[in-house]
Amino acid sequence: MPLLTVEEISAGYGNQVVIDALSFHVNRGEIVSLLGASGCGKTTALRTVAGFEPVRQGQIRIDQRLVSSATLTVPPEQRSIGMVFQDYALFPHLNIRDNIGFGLRKKPAVDRRVQVDHLLEATGLDGMAGRYPHELSGGQQQRVALARALAPRPTLLLMDEPFSNLDIELRERLSTEVRDLLKAEGISGILVTHDQHEAFAVSDKVGVMHSGRILQWDSPYNLYHQPKHRFVADFIGQGRFIPGTVRSPQTFETELGMLHGKRTCTQSAGDDVEILIRPDDVVPDDRGDIAAVVRDKAFKGAEILYTLELPTGTRLLSLFPSHADHHVGDEVRVRLDAEHLICFPKHSRTESIQ
């Protein structure tokens, strides 16, 4: 049985419905993310799981116990959850040891000390127990907030944009550390974030949200290579769409020639479609059969992301090794290596999210 089950819940504020008929589940030891742009309802969804917001319909169960329904809201402190907030919410007058041990005040002193020492070491804070929050960096404060949330050994850890105040490099490193720590402690987690890289680094499953609904609940790999909605395809990763016509379930006629993929298209032969081409589908090749002109470039360290324009005016994105330093206006040659061809009906972007 799943640890957390969210079944067809709706919630909102006043007359505004923020989430509607939302369903997902979290298995034991699993880390998931609710991913979406600001205003999509992901934080409201997390707050209903925490017990901070009631649900208007549907049910939420934690460890098979009903904690939310239209007639019941179990208080947060009775749900066996931990919470890590965006602003850390540390107690400025308590040192790091006392901050972490705050939720263990009713435990015997020996047990409290053992658990705090364990978390100080697990989060890389050993040696800082006597310091105060203002004496720590942002990353260290976030580790304290995480350790404090884990100290009571919650069944489920909820994280609301926990890394958004940190710089990119630290955010990436901490997200990986959090995943490793939760896995080591055997604690399930839900991360709310607008950053797909963060969600992918942490999560076993990701739910892409839009307008209060989850459009696709899937692994990071499938969200990237097999998006089921045009909105998801636009939101996840980078890419450009090119027009095409279906010739068979796995064959498309395009301005780049006949493209063959491994996935079966649901559209009928003769239908006009739009085909998603990712940057990693467009491979630099001096002998490639596609000539294009560099229109823009973005240096990314080990790679350069080029915007390439075809003779027809269509633009594609392509990743080149960083030593292949071309200038805007240069002609380059590439070839297409796209096994995971994704197609959508023409003009399906808004239709897929209604």
Image: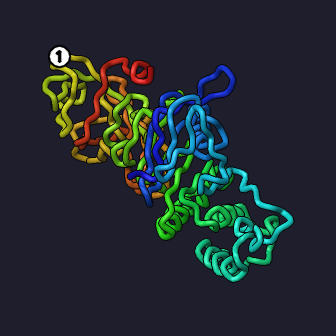
Residue found 44% across the figure and 60% down from its top: 29
Look at the picture and state if 301 lies above or below 243. below
Quarter of the figure with residue 218: top left
Where residue 67 sits in the image (x, y, percent)? 56, 45
* Residue picked out by circle 1: 270
Q: Is residue 235 visible?
A: no
Label count reads: 1
Where residue 31 sits in the image (x, y, percent)? 47, 55
Where residue 215 sits in the image (x, y, percent)? 42, 32
Q: Is residue 59 left or right of residue 344?
A: right
**199 and 96: which is toward the camera:** 96
Where residue 213 sits in the image (x, y, percent)? 48, 31
Q: Is residue 68 visible?
A: yes
Look at the picture and state if 202 lies above or below 67. below
**348 and 141: which is toward the camera:** 141
Q: Is residue 126 left or right of residue 320?
A: right
Quarter of the figure with residue 98: bottom right
